[in-house]
Image (cartoon, rainbow, N blue to C red):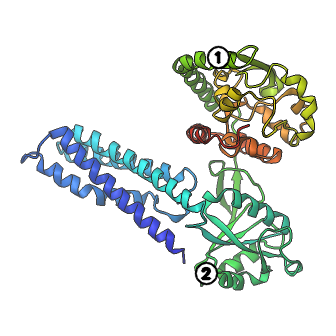
Amino acid sequence: MGPGWAARYRATVIFSDILCALLAGGLAVVVRFGEVTPYVEPYALSSAALPLLWVVVVGLSRAYEPRFAGVGSEEFRRVARAGVMLTAAVAVVAYVTKIDVARGYVIIALPVMTLLTLLARYALRRNLHRKRTKLQCMRRVIAVGHQGSVADLVRLLQKERYHGMHIVGACLPDDRACAGSEGVGVPVLGGFSDVPLVVAQAQADTVAVLACPELDGSALRRLAWRLEKSRTDLVVAPALMEVAGPRTTIRPVAGMPLLHVEHPELAGGRRLVKNVFDRVVAGLGLLLVSPLFLLIAVAVRATSPGPAFFRQTRVGKDGRTFTIVKFRTMGVDAENRKVELASDRDGVLFKIRHDPRVTRVGAFLRRHSLDELPQLVNVVKGDMSLVGPRPPLPEEVARYGDDVRRRLLVRPGMTGLWQVSGRSDLSWEEAVRLDLRYMENWSLTLDLQIMWKTWSAVARGSGAY
């Protein structure tokens, strides 16, 4: 049985969709016809019936499924697909039946309804995320696996609460179940054989099984049978991590569900589209923010001696070096003083909270990432992308291992998953994990999502120093 909040959230979403359809239908009648006349009455009745039709179409598109609530872009894709399906169906029916339909009404009602629904879903999701930061509207999860993998999952979900999964207990291998919770982060409530009892004891509604040899296909099947009675959800993490849904498909072969993983697309047509998109948007951005460039340059020069811009060598795609351009945020002797502060570095990165080399104006620019605006020039030149891994220094690249060097297969970005997930508050290992996740699962849709979230991260100014 799913948690009560999920049913309430679904009811709220349905009510929101109904309201959006009513607003879109009413707006279409007013804009297209202006007043209700005998000719307009059928359209007014259609607008009244539109909410029911919309809910049915969205339901057929499976956009009300609880697994999409609050996480990922699949919910929005399904709503958009429902809007396209309904528009196409109306066009086909009108053509086949020879019904004379006012095209202006259809062109206004259906796209506006879809857009309003997407905006309403986004608002509801933001509200859900705010509640989840307070541990409300969460699924109570029992994690099943080995100590290390359970601890990693606990640490990740405690940091990213918007996923809505609160691990309330763990089940370790039977021979380790009595070892205590040290190093796990949550109470160890039993072994693999105790999972159904632990679920009842902890009042959990979800069991998350992590990859381990003890829980093979037969064991998982028996566990699923035992969880059927309580209607407890069962989710299974594959051994291959950090691979997003679009790259994975399940293909049944001889009765076995095989997980097929596509290779990441690092070249080809989609990359060409990304490059063109980056340069066009960066060029337009330079035109829009050019007056701001002048104000920032004057502020930097007026508050500390030295040039307004700072140039530094960074490593780009395939290990090629380029010169990055930023507004200067430190004193002119910053590089000389770096040796004195080297003991405070975090792993490969050199990041210091309350860096004494940063000027007062520089601190403000860094907090809101205004110092990085000149990198739009690097994007136009093709050295960087709008979204991508963080551009590293040559001395950082010299310390890369083979896994980390994979970041150099794509162009670095002005923003990325590291920017919207904590910026300088991230550890070196976490920053690498996010960069690799991005390049493994790149898509233009993901780029747009990261760019949208960047505005919020920059406005908050958290994690920037």
In this picture, is 244 found above or below 452? Answer: below
Residue 161 — which label? none
Nearer the viewer's eye, disc 1 or disc 2? 1
Side (left or right) of 109 relative to 453: left
Q: Amino acid under label 2? A: Glu
Q: Are marks 1 and 2 in contact (CB under 8 Å)?
A: no
Side (left or right) of 27 relative to 456: left
In this picture, is 4 found above or below 359? Answer: below
Q: Where is residue 205 in the image (x, y as percent from the top left)?
A: 61, 75
Q: Name the residue under label 2.
A: 228
Side (left or right) of 77 relative to 305: left
Crowdedness of circle 1 by 10 Å Cα count: few (<14), some, many (20+)? some
Q: Amino acid under label 1? A: Ala
Label 1 – label 2 distance at C-alpha: 65 Å
Q: Residue at x 80, y 35 (%)?
A: 355
Q: Name the residue under label 1.
A: 297
Instruction: Name the quadrant of the C terminus.
Output: top right
